Image (cartoon, rainbow, N blue to C red):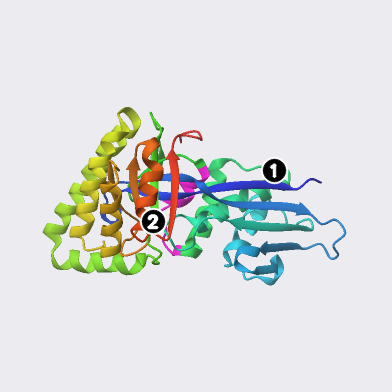
Amino acid sequence: MPAISATAPGKIILFGEHAVVYGRPAIAVPVAQVRARAIVSAQPSAFPPRVRIQAPNIGFEAHLDELPEDHPLAAAISGVAKTLNLRRLPACTVRITSTIPVAAGLGSGAAVSVAIIRAFSAFLGHPLSDEMISGLAFEVEKIHHGTPSGIDNTVITYAMPVYFVRDQPIKTFRVAKPFTIVIGDTGISSPTAVTVGDVRHAWLVYPEPYEQIFDRIGSTVQSAREIIENGDPKDLGKLMIANHQALQELEVSSPHLDRLVEAACNAGAWGAKLSGGGRGGNIIALVEKDKDLIVAEALTASGATRVIITEVRSIGKPT
């Protein structure tokens, strides 16, 4: 039996951080330049037949039956087996590699889950639909994040932009004209739980002004979707700047993030903003294709520890 492999992209939040917690929309897009990969290969001579999991990037190796049910890698594989009503699995090795930075807001955990689920179900001769893959990856996301939004597993599974409003079905949508994003990593872990908690505390104390900020962010997200679907992506630049200013008012930016945003704009980006929880993690900059390297060099010179250039386009089928 030949080895079966599958990959899954990373993701970034394009617009709507923090306000999404309070019922406003958010947009996330795939990042194809970083990926998780799962390769499943048969081990017919192994006795007793067991599933071996290898993740050399993090120095991890174990058999499936040695791991607790709530281990994310084990849960992804077991989820496939339960979906296919398989009590016994053939002897095989599941090898996982990834170029997606961990704890950087790029969807590393969801991408690993999607790659495993897609490769393992195909190896068993029953490739699962995107809808089923996303659903199983969402269950693994609960292990990672407790109460995930569903954004990561959806955008990564379908490899398309998603429009998300809390407690409503997540929708994918098409990109009318591809556009280029430069991602600059501060190298500082993004404390999402902390920043979300701080915003909530401030909102409880000052609900009216914070609701006004959330409304502005929500309007920005709605305008961004219309532009992505129908207009000139250059117009997203001013929306990024407005979104970043609102996030500054929420006090989730930082000198590191602001410095990278300013460096990107000074280097010719149409707009830039923090992406994710804030106070660390990444900024994203919208650029002309022929200026991507110039902006990338400016971000590196201003302290970015890693720079990724990605093109946002439609790949999969909309839901």
Q: Dot 2, crowdedness within 10 Å: few (<14), some or many (≥20)?
A: some
Q: Position of residue 169 (x, y in %)?
A: 39, 44
Tag 1, which secondary structure? loop
- Classify residue 287 by image quadrant: top left
Three-letter code, disc 2: Thr
Is the residue under label 1 in contact with that under label 2 (CB below 8 Å)? no
**Sequence-wise first label, 2 or 1:** 1
- Classify residue 248 by image quadrant: bottom left
Residue 68 visible here: yes
Q: Dot 1, crowdedness within 10 Å: few (<14), some or many (≥20)?
A: few
The circle on residue 145 is: none
The circle on residue 126 is: 1
Q: Which residues are magenta?
A: 145-157
Question: In the displayed image of the protein, which residue is found farthest to the right?
Answer: 45
Q: Position of residue 83 (x, y in %)?
A: 63, 51
> Relative to 141, is 255 on the left or the right?
left
The circle on residue 300 is: 2
- Taken as a whole, is the magenta stretch helix, strand or loop? helix
Q: Is residue 184 above or below residue 206?
A: above
Residue 254 visible here: no
Disc 2 from disc 1: Cα separation: 45 Å
> Relative to 93, is 279 on the left or the right?
left
**Residue at 19% from the left image edge and 67% from the top image edge:** 202
> Relative to 73, is 201 on the left or the right?
left
**Residue at 56% from the left image edge and 45% from the top image edge:** 132
Q: Is residue 195 above or below residue 285?
A: below
